[in-house]
Image: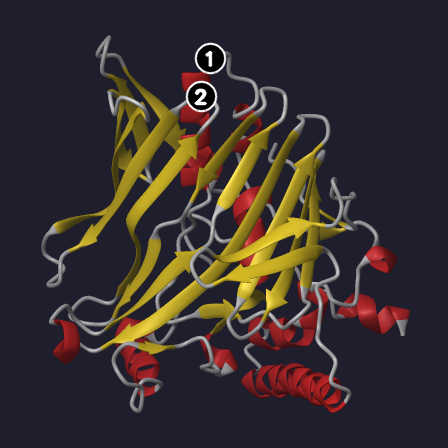
């Protein structure tokens, strides 16, 4: 049994600048296949319950995608947040790190929707990262990361809400817009500072130019230093002939006086600069090629330490089928995972039991949404590790 378990653990290369999926059929045919899924979907509908065939999946769970944005980096942007001397320098480092969590997304494909209780546990050096799926409908994921050496902590609760929009309803082209609800809290414990931030939206457009873009606004605040940033992410226009895809514009200012201190400009998939409004000095704070290109694939260091709930194990057979382009095997394995979850749900309902997360304390409020607290102060080292880029 142990041997079988090991062969089912599949860890695939991280999403990077060049992308991981090559559609041999080309965008037009993929577009037709994707649109076929929405024939009976009303405009404005929530898509969280839609089941995708395996041919539309990339070989990894959404939980892994969240985790990769933290532990898969070519340059340690998170560690830099903790070593800068002044509050403004640390704040700019946090802005740069927040930008680094954005990753390219390929048109027409999506990761697996994590099952309830699914986990993903990975270490990169002294940074230990643990994720758990605390709700399936609606899908809510929580990430807790700690680095005892750097003395920092990250808590990230995410609740994506994807909705389908028909061009007849909004005159903006047929599209899917995923609002990423929830907040991230980055604590720099050496300085007693907590940075609170949200995420931009993910926009998937089908007509007239197919593509996937990060759009909308992001806000970063640190109450201890009184600094705040507002970032705006731009994309293509409706016809795809105008706009500035991948662009970022923003300002860092004093929260109390609203006095602007720095201007932020650039592209999240290229470089981002910051301009000191007092001195006029401009410098690069983020270079995507250094951070999210040439990323290394995680590896299993301790197979016996991998939990049965680990994403790479839960979806291992599905990923194997996708990588081998054995769509029949992939679909069969995916249905088996989903049916097992339905059986567990029926069993809990028959016994009037309520499922509870193993690693987080969960709360929900209609106004503020989902919130979570970790049950442990520190995340333990993981059996799966990510090697440092040489």
**Residue located farthest toward the top when viewing the structure as drawn:** 279
Q: Element under label 2? A: loop
Badge number at residue 86? 1
Report the quarter where the C terminus lies: top right
Towards the viewer: 312 or 194? 194
Q: Earlier in the sequence, mark 2 or mark 1?
A: 1
Looking at the image, is 170 positioned above or below residue 235? below
Q: Residue at x 31, y 91 (%)?
A: 40
The correct choice, above or below, for 162 with respect to 54 in the image is above
| Residue 162 disc label | none
In the picture of the structure, the residue carrying the numbered disc 2 is 225
Q: Is residue 297 visible?
A: no
Residue sitting nearer the eye, 352 or 318: 352
**Quadrant hosting residue 66:** bottom right
Quadrant where the N terminus is found in the figure = bottom right
Image location (x, y in percent) of residue 132: 65, 59
Q: Residue at x 30, y 36 (%)?
A: 230
Q: Residue at x 53, y 24 (%)?
A: 80
Residue at 74% x, 40% y is 377
Judge depth for marks 2 and 1 and give the one in front: 2
> Could you say which is closer to the camera, residue 115 or residue 269?
115
In screen coordinates, is 65 left or right of 132?
A: left
Q: Position of residue 305 (x, y in %)?
A: 85, 56
Which sits in the foreground, 236 or 387? Answer: 236
* Residue 147 % position (x, y): 69, 33
**Callout 1 environment at 10 Å: few (<14), some (14 to 19), or many (20+)?**
few
Q: How is the image coloured?
A: secondary structure
Q: Is residue 72 left or right of residue 181?
A: right
């Amino acid at each position: 049994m142990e041997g079988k378990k090991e062969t089912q653990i599949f860890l695939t290369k991280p999403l990077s600048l060049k992308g991981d999926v090559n559609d041999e059929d080309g965008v037009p045919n993929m577009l037709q296949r994707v649109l076929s899924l929405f024939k009976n979907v009303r405009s404005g509908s929530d898509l969280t319950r839609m089941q995708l065939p395996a041919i539309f999946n990339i070989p990894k769970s959404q939980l892994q995608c969240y985790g990769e944005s933290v532990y898969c980096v070519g340059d340690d942007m998170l560690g830099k947040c903790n070593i800068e001397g002044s509050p403004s320098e640390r704040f700019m480092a946090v802005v740069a790190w927040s930008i680094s969590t954005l990753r390219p997304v390929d048109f027409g494909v999506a990761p697996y929707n994590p099952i309830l209780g699914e986990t993903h546990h990975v270490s990169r050096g002294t940074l230990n990262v643990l994720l758990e799926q605390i709700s399936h409908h609606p899908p809510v994921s929580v990430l807790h990361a700690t680095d005892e050496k750097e003395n920092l902590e990250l808590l990230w609760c995410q609740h994506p809400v994807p909705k389908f929009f028909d061009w007849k309803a909004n005159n903006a082209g047929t599209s899917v817009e995923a609002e990423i609800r929830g907040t991230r809290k980055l604590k720099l414990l050496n300085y007693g500072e907590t940075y609170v931030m949200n995420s931009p939206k993910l926009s998937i457009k089908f007509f007239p130019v197919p593509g996937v873009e990060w759009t909308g606004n992001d806000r970063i605040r640190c109450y201890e230093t009184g600094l705040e940033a507002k970032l705006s992410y731009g994309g293509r226009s409706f016809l795809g002939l105008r706009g500035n895809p991948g662009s970022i514009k923003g300002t860092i200012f004093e929260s109390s006086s609203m006095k602007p201190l720095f201007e932020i400009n650039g592209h999240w998939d290229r470089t981002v600069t910051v301009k000191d409004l007092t001195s006029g000095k401009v410098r690069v704070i983020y270079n995507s090629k250094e951070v999210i290109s040439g990323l290394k694939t995680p590896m299993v260091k301790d197979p016996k330490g991998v939990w049965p709930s680990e994403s790479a194990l839960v979806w291992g057979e599905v990923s194997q089928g996708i990588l081998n382009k054995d769509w029949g095997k992939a679909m069969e394995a995916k249905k088996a995972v989903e049916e097992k979850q339905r059986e567990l749900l029926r069993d809990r309902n028959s016994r009037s039991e309520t499922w509870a997360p193993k690693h987080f304390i969960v709360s929900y409020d209609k106004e503020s949404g989902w919130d979570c607290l970790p049950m442990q102060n520190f995340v333990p080292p993981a059996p799966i590790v990510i090697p440092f880029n040489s």
